Image (cartoon, rainbow, N blue to C red):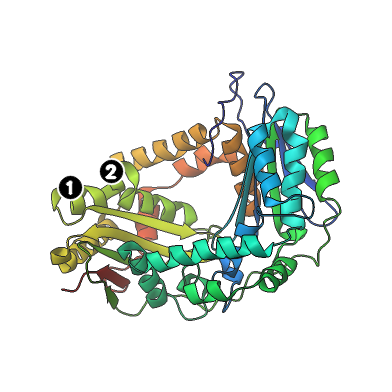
Amino acid sequence: MAWRDRPTPPGPRALPIAPDAVTRIALDNGLIALIKEQPGSGLLAVHGYVTAGAMFDETRSGLARLTAALLTRGTRSWSSRDIAETLDGMGAAVGISAGMETVTVSARALREDAATVLAMLGEMLMAPTFPDDELSNVRGELVTGLRMAQQDTRYMAERTFRALAFPAGHPHARIPDGEEAVVASLRRDDLAAFHAVWYQPAAAILAVVGDLPAQSTAAMIRRVFGDWGGTGPRPLPDTPPAAVPPSVLRAEVRLPGKVQSDVIVGVPGITRRDAAYYPTMMANLILGQLGMMGRLGERVREQQGMAYYAYSDLRAGLIAGPWWVRAGINPRNEAQAVASIVEEIRRFRAEGPQQDELADAREFLTGGLALRLETTAGIAQALAEIELFGLGLDFIERYPALIHAISGDDIRRAAERFPPTAYAVATAGPPL
C-alpha cells in the first residue's frame, strides 16, 4: 500500500467484495466506477487506472511517465502549491504515476473531505495545465534519475535484457522510465498532446471505497467526471510477437568501479487473461518468491552461495511481459550462478512442485488476499484490478476454489514455458 489506513471494523464474516456489496456504474462517456460502502471507517480510499502508460510512448520513451508526473503539479483551478497545501491541511493524499500499461491513480481522505479530494483528482485527470516551471523541475528530476541509473547494475541489466528478449517496437523492449535524451527534449505541447489522445474517460476505471452511502458516492462521481469528454476507447498498441528465443541469447554491459554483478535470465511470458495464468503464477511463486525467494533463494543463494539475492518475477498484464529470474552475484561467479539458475529451472520443469510447496502456495495466495482486503485501500485496489482484467465481481468468491483447483501437474506444465535451453541472459557488472 502507498499509505496506511485503519483496518475495517469487525463484523459478520462476510467477504469484503461480493457482487451484491458493490455498486458498478458506467457513465455515458465510458468511465467505469465501482463503489463499496465501508461504514465506520471514517475514510475514503480511491484506486484507479487510466490505460495511458508507457506502452503508448512509441518512439518517445518517457513521455507517459513525464505526463503523469505533471498531473499533480497544476490544474485549471489549482496551482501546485494550492494542491500541496490543501492536501496537507486535510491530512489527505493523492498519487498518480505511470507504469508500462496504465497510469495508477490513488487517493485517500477523511469522509468529510471526500468531495474536495475527488474534485481535485478529477481536475488532475481531466484539466492539467502542465506549467512550464513545474515541467522544468520535474523533467530535471527525471533526467537526473535516468543519468544516475546508467551506473546502476540492476537497472542496466534490465535495460539490456529487455532489448535482448523482446523485438524492436515491442513495449517491453524498453524500460518504462524513459530515455534521458528523450525526456530532456519533451516540451509542454508534447505532454498536452499525449494527454489529449490517451487520457480518455473510456480508458478510466475508478474504485471508491469508504464511509459514505453508495448513492452519495455515485452522485459525486457523476458530478465530477460526467462532463469528461472523449473520443471513445482506444485499442492497445500493436505489439510484434515476442516468442521464446530459438537458443540462448546473451548480452552484457560492463561498468567500471562496480563490485557486484546483476544478472537476468528469462523469456517473454503471458498476459493476465491467458488461460494458463494461474498455474504459471503459482509456478513462479514456488520457483522464486515463496518464503525466502522460493527454490531459487533456497538453493542458489542459501545452499550454493552463488547469489546475494535470487528471485523470479512474472509480469503478466494487458500485454505479455517478461518471466525472469533476477540475481545479484559476485562477478567471479557470473557463469556459475547462471548455470545454477538454469539447472533449478530444469529441475522444476521435470519434477514440478512438492506437495508441501503446493500447499504452502495455496495457503499464501488465499491468506494473502484476505490480508490485503482488510483495509479500505486494499479493497479499492482489488476492485480496480478486477475491473481492469475483466475478472467479474464474484472473483473473490471464486478465488479460493480457483487456486485449490490448480494441480501440481498444471504447474509443472506451466513451467515448460521457461525452457532451460532457450532463454535470454543479460549481465551488468564490473569489467572482468
Could you tell me which secondary element the residue under label 1 belongs to? helix
Query: In the shown orientation, is residue 25 left or right of residue 142?
Result: right
Which of the labelled discs sits on residue 302, or is there none? 1
Q: Horizontal and vertical percent for residue 240?
A: 53, 79
User: Dot 2 corresponds to which residue?
Assistant: 292
Q: Horizontal and vertical percent for residue 326?
A: 31, 59
**Nearest the eye: 113 or 241:** 113
The residue located at (56%, 37%) in the rendering is: 378
Of mark 2 and mark 1, the one earlier in the sequence is 2
Q: Horizontal and vertical percent for residue 93?
A: 62, 40
Query: In the shown orientation, is residue 285 left or right of residue 278?
Result: left
Could you tell me which secondary element the residue under label 2 belongs to? helix
The residue located at (73%, 60%) in the rendering is: 129
How many marks the image carries: the answer is: 2
Residue 38 occupies which quadrant of the picture? top right
Disc 2 marks a residue whose amino acid type is Met
- Is residue 53 at all visible to an observer of this figure? no
